[in-house]
Image (cartoon, helix red, strand yellow):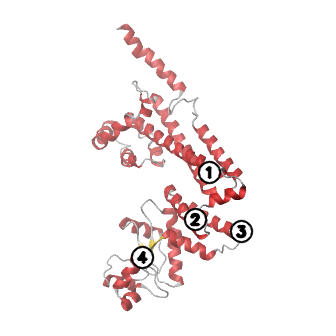
Amino acid sequence: IVAEGYMDVIALNGGGFDTAVAPLGTAITEYQLRLLWRLTDEPIVALDGDKAGINAAMRAIDLALPILSIGKSLRFAILPQSQDPDDIIQSQGAEKMKEIIDNAIPMVDLLWQRQLEVQKLDSPDRKAAFDASLKSITKRIAEPSIRNHYFAAFKSKRAELLNTSNFRTARNIKTGSNNAFATLGTKASALAVDSSNTILIRETVILAILLSYPELIKEFSYNIEKTEWHNAHYNGLIKTLISLSNEQHSKIKDELHGSYQQQILDILNNPHVKISPALRKIKNNEIAIKTLKEEFMKLETSEGIQKEIRDAIDDLNSASGESLTWRLNQATRARSNAEKSTLDDIEAIGEDKAAMTDFLQNLIDNEVWIKKNK
């Protein structure tokens, strides 16, 4: 529980709330927020119920938005006007304080209430400004999944407020296009799902190559670390790869197989992995390096495409049909271009034709020639 001053912390402790802290009259800092999240997933901010307390709560929200991570947030215990925890415990007892804390509201609700208070909705222009303010809030959230959920929550609250449970259908009727936005929404969703699947495949191919060529882990350690990996199942393995990047190859293999043996087998047996030229019978570091560069580049490109798709979906309620169609077509074209190799034409993930030619020549020069002479 985050209170305002030390007297509040003393009162809360005396009332049986022994996990209370205070920033001592100053605004909560980002460093303090991060410390709080190390102790608990959802600290409860219980600031005074006066204007200064509410403003302090809003400042904490503005500070928290860009650094929210999955499972980490804030809740707010709204105290009665001009009362602090010390006043409530002294006058009404610890049970009343517990009731207030138990009814702490999520951050998204307080954000919504703030926007309602500062923006009237008595004209189309003001409604448009209100929509823009909500979108601006969600764009400040760095974590994509949290951003999408906040947008969905705002959209639901907006529909309830305006008594239009299907705002998209209302717009379709108005424009005389019953299927326009349904089609665009379907297209955007399919595009997003398809891109996500491709990203997961690329991640698996990259890890398979790194596991098969541990001597390349150090060379690509920067790429490994800066990449925003989407498959959370790989988090432990990726962290281990980064930590072992400067170790000897034999130690890397021992460490990885000791901790991730089954996961490594699953990765290497993936059907998409088996078609990569870097993972055929003959080891070829040059092909492996080319393929890794290609796949990391495409992952970065795909992430940009996913962002464009998310923004386009966010705009479903505000953009014109023509504008949205153009944006989704641009994303589709960008995805198509991303499928093309920067080295040569590509037929499958990680397969460079020039590299494949070298690979086939190696087969002819080695395995085929050997069999023929047998």
Which one is earlier in the sequence, the residue at label 4 or at label 2? 4
> Where in the figure is residue 352, as x and y percent of width and height?
53, 29
Element type at marker 2? helix
- State the quadrant of the N terminus: bottom left
Instruction: State whether residue 214 appears in this view.
Output: no
Instruction: State whether residue 46 appears in this view.
Output: yes
Element type at marker 4? loop
Element type at marker 3? helix
- Foreground: 259 or 149? 149
Q: Image quadrant of residue 114?
A: bottom right
- The residue indicated by pointer 2 is 137
Which amino acid type corresponds to the residue marked 3 in the rendered image? Answer: Asp
Which amino acid type corresponds to the residue marked 2 in the rendered image? Answer: Ile
- The residue indicated by pointer 1 is 182
In the displayed structure, 69 sits above or below 238; it is below
Which residue occupies 56% across, 43% down? 301
Q: Residue furthest bottom?
A: 91
| 44 relative to 114 in the view: left or right | left
Number of other residues with Cα within 10 Å of mark 1, as a class: few under 14, some 14 to 19, many 20 or more: some
> Where in the figure is residue 142, as x and y percent of width and height?
52, 58
- The residue indicated by pointer 3 is 125
> Where in the figure is residue 254, as x and y percent of width and height?
28, 39
Number of other residues with Cα within 10 Å of mark 2, as a class: few under 14, some 14 to 19, many 20 or more: some
Cα separation, mark 1 vs mark 2, equals 26 Å
